């Protein structure tokens, strides 16, 4: 849950020659909700929810997709570790190139704000960072093409070309976090069936994703994610160790999907 989105038809898809991304997996109106569980001393407990939504928005005189992720702990657990997280990215509708990113989190009393203004033509991002209600810090970070933020990277990953892939295939991605660009690898492990309450048994693609050490994760830890083996490429289960214990997010609700879920297994 921690630092763990055009109601019109595109008749022509403009291929992103540089990054090779064309959005064909989701549309305006998609909304998916995950229940987050925490494991400590071998006991799994549901502690909160994360919601991802896609909507059309006009920003900076552009027609963009607004990719929004909100995370919150359940009221019963607020006394222990209150979470109110907001992550959102505005991206080009077809190529998913980010234009603006905003992050505002509250986690157990710790607060952080981030804003990114992408200048693709100048190959840099202007960043505002504010921690624990302190002063604003402004920096400019150089980036190479095809660099994404945390939110846009999740949706870009749903549009990689997975046709005919074999276990061991790695999909690299550059992800900007705070003031640094990290090379993150999506390692394909193979196909696997997972039973998801409310959706039945689903045929999934299984990936191992590199994690970046910081406030939540330790160095060398890996995140496991299962996505539907259909045109949605929708994550249905995510598992990861954290500094203390481990967390799991499982899909509990999905609406406005671009494609019908066609990976149910008998």
Image: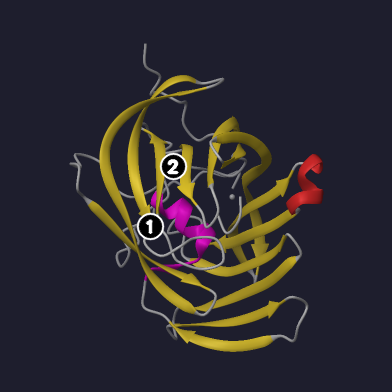
Magenta span contains residue 151 = yes
Q: Is residue 84 above or below residue 180?
A: above
Residue 99 image position (x, y, % from top left): 55, 70
| Residue at 28%, 50% in the rendered image | 187
Circle 2 residue: 25
Q: Secondary structure at mark 2?
A: loop
Q: Residue furthest front?
A: 41
Q: Is residue 257 above or below residue 106?
A: above
State if disc 1 and disc 2 touch (CB < 8 Å). Answer: no
Magenta-highlighted stretch: main secondary structure? helix
| Residue at 69%, 41% in the rendered image | 48
Front-lying residue, 9 or 266: 266
Q: Secondary structure at mark 1?
A: loop
Residue 83 image position (x, y, % from top left): 72, 54
Q: Can residue 256 be seen here?
A: no
Residue 123 image position (x, y, % from top left): 42, 83
Q: Nearer the viewer, mark 2 or mark 1?
A: 2
Q: Residues within 10 Å of mark 2 (few under 14, many from 20)?
A: some
Q: Quadrant of residue 166?
A: top left
Q: Can residue 135 be seen here?
A: yes
The image's mark for residue 14 is: 1
The image's mark for residue 237 is: none
Q: Quadrant of residue 142?
A: bottom left
Task: From the viewer's perspective, tell me whether residue 98 is left or right of residue 264.
Answer: right
User: Which corner quadrant holds the C terminus?
Assistant: top left
Front-lying residue, 74 or 89: 74
Distance, label 2 to label 1, CA atoms, is: 15 Å
Q: Which residues are magenta?
A: 146-157
Q: Residues within 10 Å of mark 1 (few under 14, many from 20)?
A: few
């Amino acid at each position: 849950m921690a630092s763990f989105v055009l109601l019109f038809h595109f008749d022509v898809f403009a291929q992103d020659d540089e990054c090779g991304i064309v959005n064909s997996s989701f549309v305006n109106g998609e909304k998916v909700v995950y229940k987050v569980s925490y494991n400590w001393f071998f006991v799994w407990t549901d502690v909160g929810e994360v919601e991802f939504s896609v909507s059309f928005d006009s920003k900076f005189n552009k027609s963009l997709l607004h990719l929004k992720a909100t995370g919150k702990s359940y009221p019963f657990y607020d006394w222990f570790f209150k979470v109110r997280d907001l992550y959102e990215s505005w991206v080009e509708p077809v190529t998913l190139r980010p234009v603006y990113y905003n992050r505002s989190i509250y986690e157990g009393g710790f607060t952080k704000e981030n804003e990114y203004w992408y200048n693709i033509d100048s190959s840099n991002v202007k960043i505002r960072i504010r921690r624990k209600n302190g002063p604003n810090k402004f920096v400019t970070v150089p980036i190479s093409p095809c660099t994404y933020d945390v939110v846009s990277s999740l949706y870009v990953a749903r549009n990689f070309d997975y046709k005919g892939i074999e276990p061991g295939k790695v999909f690299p991605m550059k992800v900007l976090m705070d003031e640094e660009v990290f090379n993150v690898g999506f390692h394909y492990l193979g196909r696997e069936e997972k039973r998801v309450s409310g959706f039945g048994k689903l045929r999934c693609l299984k990936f191992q994703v590199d994690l970046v050490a910081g406030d939540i994760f330790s160095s060398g830890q890996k995140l496991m994610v299962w996505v539907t083996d259909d045109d949605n490429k929708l994550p249905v289960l995510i598992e990861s160790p954290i500094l203390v214990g481990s967390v799991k997010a499982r899909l509990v609700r999905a609406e406005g999907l671009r494609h019908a879920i066609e990976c149910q297994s008998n």
